[in-house]
Amino acid sequence: MKLFTLKRAKHKTNNIIYNSPHSGEHFPSDFFEYTSIDKHTLLCSGDSFVDKLFSEASNNGSVFLCNEYARSFMDTNREAYELDPEMYSEEITKTLVSDSAKVKMGFGSIAKFAYTRKHIYDKKIPFSDALKRIDDYYHPIHEKLNELLNTDFEKYGYSLLVDCHSMPSYEFLGQPSAKYRQPDIILGNLHGKSCSNKITDYLTRHFMMYDLSVAHNTPFAGGFNTSHYGDPRSNHHAVQIEIKKSLYMDEITRKPNEHFEPIKIIMSSLCDHLAKDIDKLL
């Protein structure tokens, strides 16, 4: 199974890396031996079509990386061993990050629950299988991200990771009520710790220019990628963009809606303008 799609700019003009860790839709051939949940339900946990929304990044001097496998199989926006020990048989031979908020919700690097809160696995996974999954699918993604962000760092003097995600328009991951409506866009910079406020403000103005409502850090301040790759003091910046799914897709059928192309134009415009203005923001 192909791990990722990488689109490099023919003429690279910046050190902006757009990353979509949850757009993939593939599972290994033997995955469904472990679960009775259908593929459509499993994919509802992911970020369907976000890779398509940002497909113009490489045509604007930037780089675009997208995981090909599904988030329900492996989530690279977590620590590698951010796992629930109750999911595994055999001796656990690694120190796990088992007390994180995401693990408690059932969404570690190997998820316990589907989007419906049902258990994904019908039986316990041998811990040796989990280790192999992490070695084969998790580590190669982060090796590639590290390479992309750092190879040209000295040339440009900075790196910017734009981690691209989507979010349901209502209750998700601890929101207390289905009546709660998400804003159109949530920008996560770990409350200023992962990205320059100038960049965050620039993104905010861009989306507001198209009459989209924008919030910062609540309820999504950022995941492992923003915390691991963002260090503004050394000019390594990382920001997470969450796009409300109903803006561009039917959340039940998981198909693009009539607004998909206009939203894609907004994201393509961001790739264009940010590439031209990034030096002014650092």
Image (cartoon, rainbow, N blue to C red):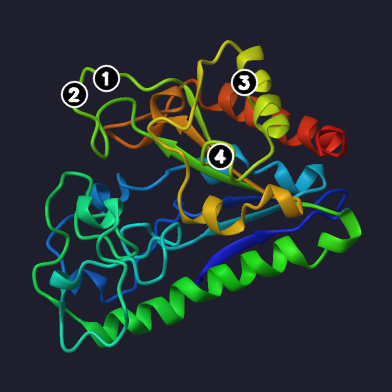
From the viewer's side, name the closer residue of 252 and 86.
86
Nearer to us of marks 4 and 3 is 4
- Residue extending farthest to the top is 211
- Residue extending farthest to the left is 122
For mark 4, give the secondary structure.
loop
Disc 3/disc 1 C-alpha distance (Å): 21 Å
For the residues labelled 4 and 3, say whether their Cβ atoms are less than 8 Å apart: no
Q: Find disc 3 in the rendering and name its residue.
A: 207
Identity, as a three-letter code, of the amino acid under mark 1: Tyr
Relative to 144, is 156 above or below?
A: above
Disc 4/disc 3 C-alpha distance (Å): 16 Å
Disc 1/disc 2 C-alpha distance (Å): 6 Å
Q: Residues within 10 Å of mark 2 (few under 14, many from 20)?
A: few
Instruction: Work out whether residue 123 can be spotted.
Output: yes
Q: Position of residue 77 (x, y in %)?
A: 45, 57
The first of marks 4 and 3 along the sequence is 4
For mark 1, give the secondary structure.
loop
For the residues labelled 1 and 4, say whether their Cβ atoms are less than 8 Å apart: no
The first of marks 3 and 1 along the sequence is 1
Q: Find disc 4 in the rendering and name its residue.
A: 189
For the residues labelled 3 and 1, say whether their Cβ atoms are less than 8 Å apart: no
Residue 143, picture quadrant: bottom right
The first of marks 2 and 3 along the sequence is 2
For the residues labelled 1 and 2, say whether their Cβ atoms are less than 8 Å apart: yes
Q: Quadrant of the C terminus?
A: top right
For the residues labelled 2 and 3, say whether their Cβ atoms are less than 8 Å apart: no
Q: Position of residue 167 (x, y in %)?
A: 39, 35
Identity, as a three-letter code, of the amino acid under mark 2: Ser
Question: What numbered label is drawn on residue 180?
Answer: 1
User: In this rendering, would 167 be left or right of 230?
Assistant: left
The first of marks 4 and 2 along the sequence is 2
Q: Find disc 2 in the rendering and name its residue.
A: 177
